[in-house]
Image (cartoon, rainbow, N blue to C red):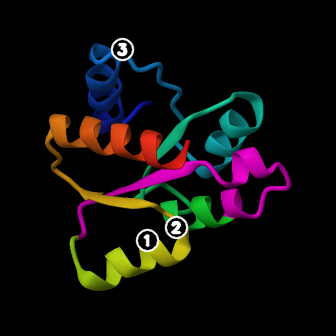
């Protein structure tokens, strides 16, 4: 079953004309990354079994540099200096807290796509 936030985010991004691929676990996300060309990742830190920090660390060591260097936004409900620092140290380029403003999310996506492509 897909979490409600994932469904909401998909609808919001598709309304902006963004093609979305989704995953609900670290293993699913790694499969999506292996099989598709992606421009950006939005990773919820609170994933089941393994968290988003674990996922981004696994991505950063992939042999395919195009995939290992993909820009990523951490999405979390935890807004502390320590959590933010851990996100950047783990390999994220940006950090947004839930609940998020959809226009801010889209602006951050646009910034990262311009900055890192």
- In what element is the residue under mark 1? helix
Q: Which residue is mark 1?
A: 87
Which circle marks residue 108 in the picture?
A: none
Q: Is residue 40 left or right of residue 99?
A: right
Where are the magenta residues, as a range? Answer: 58-78
Callouts 3 and 2 close, C-beta under 8 Å: no
- In what element is the residue under mark 3? loop
Q: Is residue 54 left or right of residue 45?
A: right
> In the image, is residue 67 above or below residue 96?
above
The answer to which of marks 3 and 2 sits earlier in the sequence is: 3
* Inter-mark Cα distance, 3 to 2: 28 Å
> Quarter holding the C terminus?
top right
How many numbered badges does the structure rendering display?
A: 3
Q: Which residue is mark 2?
A: 53
Q: Is residue 11 left or right of residue 49?
A: left
Along the viewing direction, whichever of 29 and 19 lies nearer the viewer = 19
């Amino acid at each position: 079953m897909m979490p409600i936030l994932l469904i909401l985010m998909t609808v919001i991004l598709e309304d902006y004309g963004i093609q979305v691929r989704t995953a609900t676990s670290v293993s699913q996300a790694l499969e999506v990354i292996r099989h598709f060309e992606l421009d950006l990742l939005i990773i919820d830190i609170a994933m089941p079994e393994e968290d988003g920090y674990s996922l981004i660390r696994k991505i950063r060591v992939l042999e395919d540099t195009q995939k290992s260097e993909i820009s990523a936004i951490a999405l979390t409900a935890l807004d502390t200096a320590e959590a933010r620092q851990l996100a950047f140290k783990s390999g994220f380029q940006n950090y947004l807290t839930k609940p998020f403003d959809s226009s801010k999310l889209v602006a951050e996506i646009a910034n990262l796509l311009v900055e890192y492509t």
